[in-house]
Image: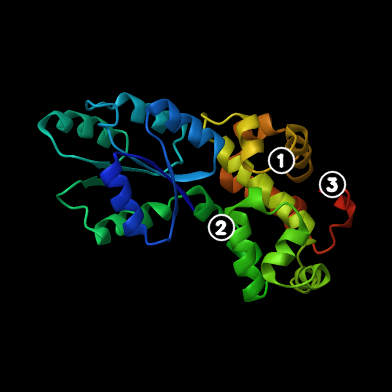
């Protein structure tokens, strides 16, 4: 899981030590870089300091909340009298997780804050959304598939999935057949569409941003998959469906079928 840290050096190093290798971090040193990083990389959680620009400000963080409402945010800052009004404003925007440097930033507290907000991350909620579909799979494959779905940009083919599971491709495909699921090729493609839909619910992401984040080499391929598994274009699905409706549609059209041969060419 990739965590964005837009905080001063001392706080950033404390945060990384507290995570103890559980999370991967990327650094941003100014607000423009924060926005670019969220759009260009698979950031699942952001740790921000309202004092990043040198004076307490809420505007940039409010903007992030507006553009990316599904992105969990943690404030990690230094308590000053001038900061009080900023924290009040951000609290009204739903940002409640605050850690104060040198007051309550013990490693345990930092780790707890990361783990709490991790439960709200898009990838985690996405896996919960697919939990019923993954349940019939063997435990070892389910673990690998969950890892792959957290980083869909890294798993583009059945061969990638089989390598992570340390089995050959045919064994991987047999596991899916025994669980009465569609082929792993279809499953990965349908899952990427569902993940794309979840990201597109945030107004700060363009279709091009999402295609790049999920590893599509062409936006056209994302559009084709959206039509195959949801019956909509990427632009239509961001406006027309809730996350639950998108899952229901995919299950009804595809994942719930035991013989999805009619779509055999769709995920190529």
- Disc 3 crowd, CA 10 A, few/some/many (<14, 14-19, 20+): some
Residue 152 is left or right of residue 57, and the answer is: right
Camera-side residue of 47 and 262: 47
Q: Please tell me whether residue 63 is drawn above or below residue 261 in the rendered image.
A: above
The residue identified by callout 1 is 216
Which comes before the other along the chain, label 2 or label 3?
2
Separation of marks 1 and 3 at Cα, in angstroms: 15 Å
Q: Which residue is at a point 21% across and 57% down the rendered structure image? A: 106
SS state under label 2: helix
Mark in front: 2 vs 1: 1
Which comes before the other along the chain, label 2 or label 1?
2
Q: Please tell me whether residue 130 is drawn above or below residue 169 in the rendered image.
A: above
In the picture, the disc for residue 266 is 3
SS state under label 1: loop
- Could you say where residue 164 lies in the image, as x and y percent from the top left? 67, 65
Mark in front: 1 vs 3: 1
Q: Which residue is at a point 75% across and 34% down the rendered structure image? A: 218
Camera-side residue of 67 and 92: 67
The residue identified by callout 2 is 127
- Disc 1 crowd, CA 10 A, few/some/many (<14, 14-19, 20+): some
Residue 187 is left or right of residue 108, and the answer is: right
Which comes before the other along the chain, label 1 or label 3?
1
């Amino acid at each position: 899981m990739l965590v964005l840290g837009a905080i001063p050096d001392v706080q950033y190093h404390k945060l990384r030590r507290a995570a103890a290798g559980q999370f991967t971090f990327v650094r941003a040193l100014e607000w423009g870089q924060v926005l670019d990083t969220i759009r260009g990389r698979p950031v699942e959680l952001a740790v921000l300091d309202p004092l990043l620009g040198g004076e307490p400000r809420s505007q940039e963080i409010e903007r992030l909340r507006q553009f990316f409402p599904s992105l969990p945010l943690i404030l990690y800052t230094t308590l000053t009298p001038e900061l009080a009004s900023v924290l009040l404003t951000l609290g009204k925007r739903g940002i409640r997780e605050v850690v104060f440097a040198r007051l309550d930033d013990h490693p345990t507290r930092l780790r707890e804050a990361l783990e709490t907000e991790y439960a709200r991350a898009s990838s985690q909620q996405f896996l919960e959304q697919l939990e019923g579909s993954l349940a019939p799979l063997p435990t070892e494959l389910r673990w690998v598939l969950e890892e792959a779905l957290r980083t869909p940009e890294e798993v583009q083919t059945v061969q990638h999935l089989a390598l992570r599971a340390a089995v050959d491709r045919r064994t991987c495909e047999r596991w899916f057949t025994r669980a009465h699921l569609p082929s792993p090729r279809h499953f990965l493609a349908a899952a990427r569409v569902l993940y794309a839909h979840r990201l597109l619910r945030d107004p700060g992401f363009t279709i091009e941003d999402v295609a790049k984040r999920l590893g599509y080499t062409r936006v056209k391929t994302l559009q084709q998959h959206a039509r195959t598994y949801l019956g909509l274009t990427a632009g239509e699905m961001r406006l027309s469906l809730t996350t639950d409706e998108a899952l229901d549609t995919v299950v009804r059209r595809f994942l719930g079928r035991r013989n999805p041969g009619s779509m055999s060419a769709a995920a190529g």
